Image: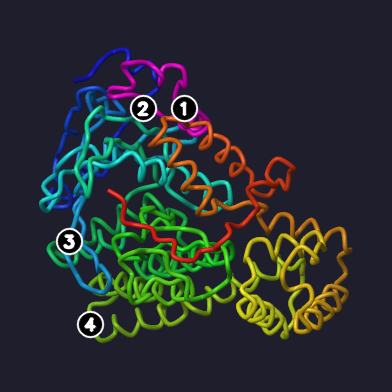
Amino acid sequence: MTNGKVEEAGWNLDNSYSRLPKKMYSQQNPTPVNSPGLIKLNESLAESLGLNVQELKSEESLAVFAGNRIPEGATPLAQAYAGHQFGHFNMLGDGRAVLLGEQLNSEHERIDIQLKGSGRTPYSRGGDGRAALGPMLREYIISEAMHGLGIPTTRSLAVVTTGESILRETKLPGAILTRTAASHIRVGTFQFAAQWGTEEELRELADYTIDRHYSDLPSEENRYLSFLKAVVNRQALLISKWQLVGFIHGVMNTDNMTISGETIDYGPCAFMDTYDPATVFSSIDVQGRYAYGNQPNIAGWNLARFAETLLPLLHDDIEEAVKIAQDVISGFLDLYDSYWLNGMRSKLGIYNEEAEDLALVENLLNIMEKYRADYTNTFRALTFDNTDEIALADKEEFKKWYDQWKERQGRQKESKTESVELMKRSNPAVIPRNHRVEEALEAAVEKDDYQVMDQLLEALSNPYAHSPHQSKYCSVPANPDGTYRTYCGT
C-alpha cells in the first residue's frame, strides 16, 4: 500500500508507541474506502509539520488521508485504553481511529498522525468504526478555534469524504479526519495499564510518557512523583484556559484527558454565550456532571484516578504511596484557582495582585449571571470601555462594580493604555458561537458550500485581532444558548 509519490509529500514517520508492550495496542490498518474526496486541508499546520502542501493535494496523498495507502515509516495501530465514562469504569480503546505514526518535524518533535473514522478495530464494541462529515468538520472548526485562542489542543490536518454513507438515525455522508496531537496518551491509557498490565509494563508506559512529554522534569528522588506533579500542573493551567474563554468540553471522561495537557475529543463541546455556571450543552449529560462550573472539580477527580494508577511507582508501601498521591492531588484546585485568577486579572487589565481581586471578579460574574449577560461580549465591551453595548450598563450593581474596577486599575503603575493592551490580548473578539458553527456545518453538509466555514475559520484564526471583519461574528443569537444541544458525534 506504499507509493513513492506519497513520500514526496514530506512524510517523516516513526511509531515509537509501537515499541511499548504489545497489550497497549493492536496492529490495525485503516479500512479502505471507495471514492474519497479532499474537503479541507490545513495548510499552515501542514507546513509546520514539514509537509509539502501541494503534494498533499495530490491523489496519492488523498489516498493516505482516506486510509487507502500507508506512507513509508508508518506502523498503523489502534491504541488500547480504559476510562471512567460519567463515573463508570469501562474497557475502551480506539474504536474508530488508527494511529499511523509520529511525524518528526524539523524541531525534532514527534506529532501523532491519526485517522479518525477509518474503520473498525478490535475495540469497536459493535460500532462501524466510521464517522460522519458534520462531526468531523465540527472538530476541525473547534480545534482550530482553540488553537487560535492559544489553548493547547489536538488539531485537524485534513478532512476527506469517503464516498460512502453511514447509518445513524438517518443516512449521513461518511468522512475521515486526520488529527494531530502531541500524543494520544490519556489518563485512560494509564488506567488500562494499571488494570490489565504488570507493574513493569506500567513503569514502561510511564517512562515512555515522561521521555516524550516531560523530559525536563526537575530532578527528584522519585521521578514518578515529579511526573504526577507536572501532569497536575499542566491540567490546572489547561482547565483555567477553558474557563477563561467559556469553553465547555461536554464529556470529560478520563479517556478524554491527555497526559500531554492538550484538549482532545471535540464531541458535544460548545462555547457559552450567556454566563451561567450550570450551562450544559451535551444531550447525554442530563445530570450536569460536566457543566461549565463543574469542570475544575471534574478535572481534579480525573487526576485522582490518574494518581491511583501511579501508586505502585510512587512508593513500595501502598499507604505511603496513597499519602504522596493525596498530597499532590489536594493541591490541584489551588493551582487552578491561581491560574484562573491571574487570567481574570488580565481580562480586567490588572497587572499586579491584591487580596480583594477575587471578590472583584466574583462580583462581576455574579452580576453577569443575574442579568444573563453574554460572557465574551461583556469582557469585550470592558476592553474598549464600551459598556453601553451590554445589558448591564443601566444596572446599579454594575455601576458600583465599574467604579470599583476603575479604582483598582488606578492602583497599579501601568498606564491605562497598557491595561487596554493587556485586555485586548486576554479577551477574544470572537469565539465559535454555536449558531455560527451550525450555520457553517449546515452549508457544508447540506449544500456542499464551504465558503461559510472558510470565512468562520478566518475570523477565528486570530480571535484577539479585534478587527472590523470579525464584528459580525460577535453577535449573539436571538435565543442565546436556549435549548441548544450537542451530541457525541459519530
The quadrant where residue 83 appears? bottom left
Q: Earlier in the sequence, mark 3 or mark 2?
A: 2
Q: Which residue is mark 2?
A: 12
Secondary structure found at label 4: helix
First along the sequence among labels 1 and 4 = 1
Question: Which residue does the image show at 17% across and 52% down from the upper left?
Answer: 24
Q: Is residue 409 left or right of residue 57?
A: right
Q: Are marks 1 and 4 in contact (CB under 8 Å)?
A: no
The residue singled out by tag 1 in the image is 50
Amino acid type of disc 1? Gly
Instruction: Please name the residue that numbered disc 4 is placed on.
Output: 318
Q: CA distance from mark 1 to mark 4?
A: 46 Å
Where residue 438 appears, as percent x and y from the top left, is 46, 48
Three-letter code, disc 4: Ile
State the residue at coordinates (46%, 73%). Answer: 296
Q: Earlier in the sequence, mark 4 or mark 2?
A: 2
Label 3: which residue? Answer: 200
* CA–CA distance in space, label 1 to label 2: 8 Å
Residue range corresponding to the magenta coloring = 36-63
The single residue placed furthest to the top in the displayed view is: 5
